[in-house]
Amino acid sequence: MKAIQITEFGGPEVLELAELAEPVRGPGEALVRISRIGVNFADTHATRNDYLAKQSLPLIPGAELVGTTEGGSRVAAIVPSGAYAQYICVPESSLVPVPDEVDDEQAAGLLIQGLTADAILRISANMQSGESVAVNAAAGGTGSLALQIARSIGAGRIIALASSPEKRDLTLSLGADIAVDSRSETLKQDLIEANDGQVLDVILEMAGGEAFEQCLSALAPFGRLVTFGIASSEENRVRTGSLMRHSRAVIGFWITHLLARPDLVKPGLERVLGAAAAGQLKTVLGGTHPLEEAAEVHRSMVARRTIGKILLDPFQ
């Protein structure tokens, strides 16, 4: 089978197309013929081995897939690695049925991003109807879904953060009330102005560095900032005295902990796939590429040139 395999850690240049033996399923596993592979920013960290979860070589990257079992069932799965391939063996308990109303591309775009957006808003931020929310990387896979889920929760004001006019226009079409330049040097003031002069209740932040500091300082008393990424690779330190003086909360989110809780994963998947099947949740697709273009896809993602969910088709 064809697969992307890396034999040394590094940037996009280490992603190489390889011919490998088709996997053989073990007890309790299903062999899945993969039709679509989801590409995530976390994949770029995995290939450099600087993500929270450490990797080992050789490595087939990729954590999410949609495909068909030997029995003909359409399924989706989230795996630790191995999705950048034509075939994979997955524990049967990890397979999720895909509704007939949801095509493979929509399902692949909802799997990790949908779970993440749903959990960040409903579990980590405990967002309530009427609260204001700002979403960083709002034109991306997770951000674009978070905008729509925030609207369904009944957010009072939805502010999208994005790095280009094109991306900001997209967020407005997805339900944001206003869009702000995520690279602004006056991000705190811009956020408050976008919220009609008021500090914010909930902020979803994934850039780190100065953007994190600006967002944190724009939080209202009892406001919650959920950090779900560090795209800048610049980690931040939070002073407890500052948190106490402003009654603010900083909450970290890592999907690995969510995936370890089947009692949370199942209802999350049911909500996002059900909403998609009912036409209430739209996955923004940024393009489908063949496996051999995985390195270029990673380059575009690191450079922030992508919009929406990027997919790979292993049989294209």
Image (tube, helix red, strand yellow):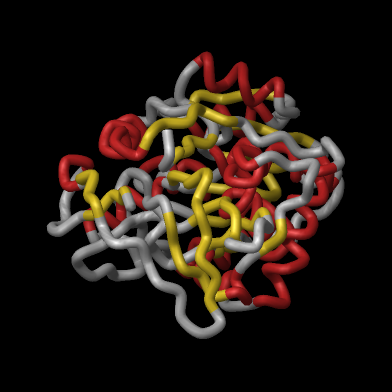
Q: Residue at x 42, y 62 (%)?
A: 238
Q: Residue furthest front?
A: 71
What percent of the width, then of the height, locates residue 9? 16, 57
Vertical position of residue 261 compared to residue 231: above or below = below
| Relative to 10, 283 lies left or right | right
Residue 44 visible in the snapshot? yes
Residue pictured at 38% horizontal, 51% vertical: 84
* Residue 47 on image: x %, y %: 25, 54
Image quadrant where one finds the C terminus: top left
Please say if 239 is above or below 62: below
Q: Nearer the viewer, residue 169 or 310?
A: 310
Residue found farthest to the bottom: 27
Give the total number of marks visible in the rendering: 0
Say which residue appears at 17% left-offset and 47% top-offset: 14
Residue 98: x and y, percent?
71, 53
Quarter of the view holding residue 94:
bottom right
**Residue 252 shows up from this direction:** no
Q: Pick the residue in front: 314 or 227.
A: 314
The percent coordinates of residue 135 (x first, y second) are: 60, 40
Q: Is residue 67 left or right of residue 277?
A: left
Depth check: give the residue in front, 2 or 16: 2
Above or below, 52 against 313 in this view is below
Quarter-of-image position of residue 284: top right
Lateral position of residue 217 relative to residue 145, left or right = left
Q: Nearer the viewer, residue 232 or 307?
A: 307
Q: Residue at x 35, y 62 (%)?
A: 22
